[in-house]
């Protein structure tokens, strides 16, 4: 029974990463793009990227997961995006690439809790 619940959670998580990623691309960061590009930190990510991403991700993730799991998954995806992609590359990711990162992190968090 728990395995079925976990699979359903993973499937519903796909939308979380798309919403959080698109909100960052078109939301508050876009308005401050010039300022943020001058104040970058590691691989070209704006300083407030982590804060904005996590807030957007948490709004969506908590619709599907307990808060503890939502926090872990949102932090994992944010870190993974930063490790795998420069900010310029991140902005050009396809939906499938974003989903792959999200599914990797949901597998890490939710599968660990089952064992």
Image (cartoon, helix red, strand yellow):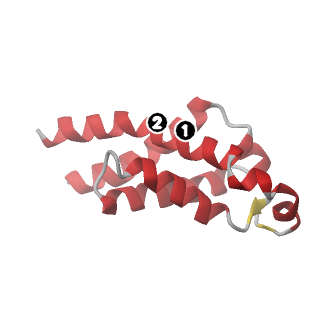
Mark 2 Cα shell of 10 Å, populated few (<14), some (14-19), many (≥20): some
At 72% across and 68% down in the image, what residue appears? 47
Q: Is residue 23 above or below residue 42?
A: above
Q: Residue furthest toward the left?
A: 1
Left/right of residue 70 with respect to residue 66 in the rendered view: right
Q: Is residue 20 above or below residue 45?
A: above
Q: Secondary structure at mark 1?
A: helix
At 35% across and 54% down in the image, what residue appears? 109
Q: Position of residue 30 (x, y in %)?
A: 77, 50
Q: Position of residue 4 (x, y in %)?
A: 19, 35
Q: Position of residue 101 (x, y in %)?
A: 53, 43
At 68% across and 49% down in the image, what residue appears? 27
| Cβ atoms at labels 2 and 1 below 8 Å apart | yes
Label 2 – label 1 distance at C-alpha:
5 Å
Tell me the quarter of the picture where residue 41 sits.
Answer: bottom right
Left/right of residue 50 with respect to residue 17 in the rendered view: right
Tell me the quarter of the picture where residue 12 sits.
Answer: top left
Quarter placement of the N terminus: top left
Tell me the quarter of the picture where residue 7 sits.
Answer: top left
Q: Secondary structure at mark 2?
A: helix
Left/right of residue 6 with respect to residue 59 in the rendered view: left
Left/right of residue 112 with respect to residue 108 in the rendered view: left
Q: Position of residue 44 (x, y in %)?
A: 80, 59
Give the label on residue 18, or none. Answer: 1
At 70% across and 45% down in the image, what residue appears? 25
How many circles with numbers are drawn on the protein?
2
| Residue beneath disc 2 | 15
């Amino acid at each position: 029974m728990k395995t079925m619940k976990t699979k359903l959670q993973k499937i519903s998580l796909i939308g979380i990463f798309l919403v959080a990623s698109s909100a960052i691309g078109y939301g508050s960061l876009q308005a401050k793009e010039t300022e943020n590009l001058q104040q970058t930190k590691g691989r070209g990510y704006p300083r407030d990227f982590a804060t904005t991403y996590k807030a957007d991700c948490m709004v969506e993730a908590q619709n599907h997961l307990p808060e503890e799991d939502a926090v872990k998954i949102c932090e994992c995806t944010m870190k993974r995006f930063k490790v795998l992609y420069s900010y310029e590359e991140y902005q050009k990711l396809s939906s499938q690439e974003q989903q792959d990162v999200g599914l990797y992190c949901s597998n890490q968090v939710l599968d660990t809790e089952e064992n």
